[in-house]
Amino acid sequence: MKFIHTADIHWGMVPDSDRPWGKKREQAIRLTFQAIIEDARDSRADLLLISGDLFHRQPLARDLKEVNYLFSTIPQTQVIIIAGNHDRIRKNSAVLSFSWASNVTFLESEDVSSVYFEDINTEVTGFSYYTAEIPEPRLDALEAPEDGKIHILLGHGGDANHVPIDRAALASSGFSYIALGHIHRPEILLDKKMAYCGSPEPLDKTETGRHGILYGEIDPESGQVTTLDFIPMAKLRYIPLIVRVTPDTTNTELYLKIAHEIEQRGNDNIFRFKVQGMRDPDISFDLDALKLRFRIADIIDETEPQYDFSALFAEHPSDMIGFYIQALKKPDMSPVEKKALFYGIHALLLTTDERS
């Protein structure tokens, strides 16, 4: 029996909505979900498991129609869905009255329910969110009966406010596979038995690393997962990088260095840069031009001007510069204290230059 495990698609979300590439990110979410459907078709998967947050918010009828059409193109695959905390079911939710394609089962009850597929002797169990938070560990006490069926559990959560999980309890629950959602980073918690698939696309700049789906196979005789492979799906990555400078680094050199790092890793990705090191006190790096050319979510300037405070104090022992250094310079300074010292010295030196 073959299955694809996905979750946290967040259909309808516009990541980086305040950036020029925001609409393309929204489109990437939809295109990647279409690619998942194509993978289900090409692999002839028996099940497509969606462990919550298919939608970013309460879906409208048009959203339901869009994804339902995609599901209808893979009639050989049974699609099982639960609602997560983002697309939780509300009183007047369109989900409650929607007519899904014949191969789609939405486990829409807030109580634990199951669906059985006789042709593959597989029962899938789960429940949907009706509130933004569920602090109770509702999965831990569930156990699969010993009835010769393949048993799969869908769950959404894993933190203190969203269905906390006891891994040891679930490890002994008897389910062939436990398909989890809510955590956007893929992680196999128990070897070929329980896993977070992660989100198919990274959804904000903190979600670095790989993103995709899990493809699995379960032996119908033993009921054990024999294959569980991660398949990359994301159109792009958020990439954090550190660029180091020296007092000899110029604006042009830094610009070319960052441009090279981006071109080496692919212009379609989105980058977060930290610029670190000692710089010439007379240079202030202009990084805005890079944001106009590339997809850069952040550039954080953590550089420090290379002042020789001992020499400066010797040169200005009894004026404002000397007094300022004496008052602020100390061991183990915090970043804020360092900035105050650097900016203050820079301003005082400019004032001194203007007077001379």
Image (spheres, helix red, strand yellow):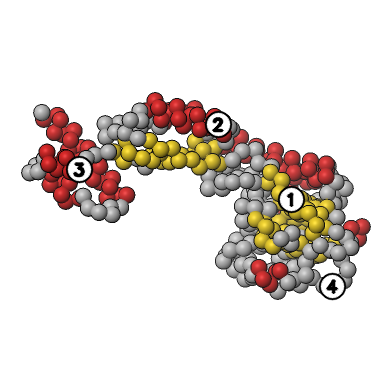
Q: Is residue 136 above or below residue 331?
A: below
Horizontally, residue 78 falls left or right of residue 153, namely right
- The amino acid type found where label 3 is placed reads Phe
Q: Of marks 1 and 2, which one's residue comes earlier in the chain?
A: 1
Q: Look at 78% across and 54% down and name the residue there.
A: 227
Residue corresponding to mark 2 = 264
Name the residue that disc number 4 marks. Answer: 146
Mark 4 or mark 2, earlier in chain: 4
Q: Position of residue 313 (x, y in %)?
A: 14, 43
Image x and y of residue 85, in percent: 63, 58
Say which amino acid is labelled 4.
Glu
Q: Please report whichever mark, 3 or 2, sits nearer to the chain's N-terminal start.
A: 2
**Decide: marks 3, 4 in contact (CB < 8 A)?**
no
Relative image position of residue 105 (x, y in whole percent): 80, 56
Taking the image as shown, residue 203 lies to the left or right of residue 92, namely left
Count of numbered marks? 4
Q: Nearer the viewer, mark 3 or mark 4?
A: 3
Which one is in front in this view, the residue at disc 4 or the one at disc 2? Answer: 2
In space, the residues marked 3 and 1 are separated at their CA atoms by 57 Å
Q: Earlier in the sequence, mark 4 or mark 1?
A: 4
Label drawn at residue 309: 3
Q: Which residue is mark 1?
A: 229
* Drawn side of residue 291 relative to residue 138, left or right: left
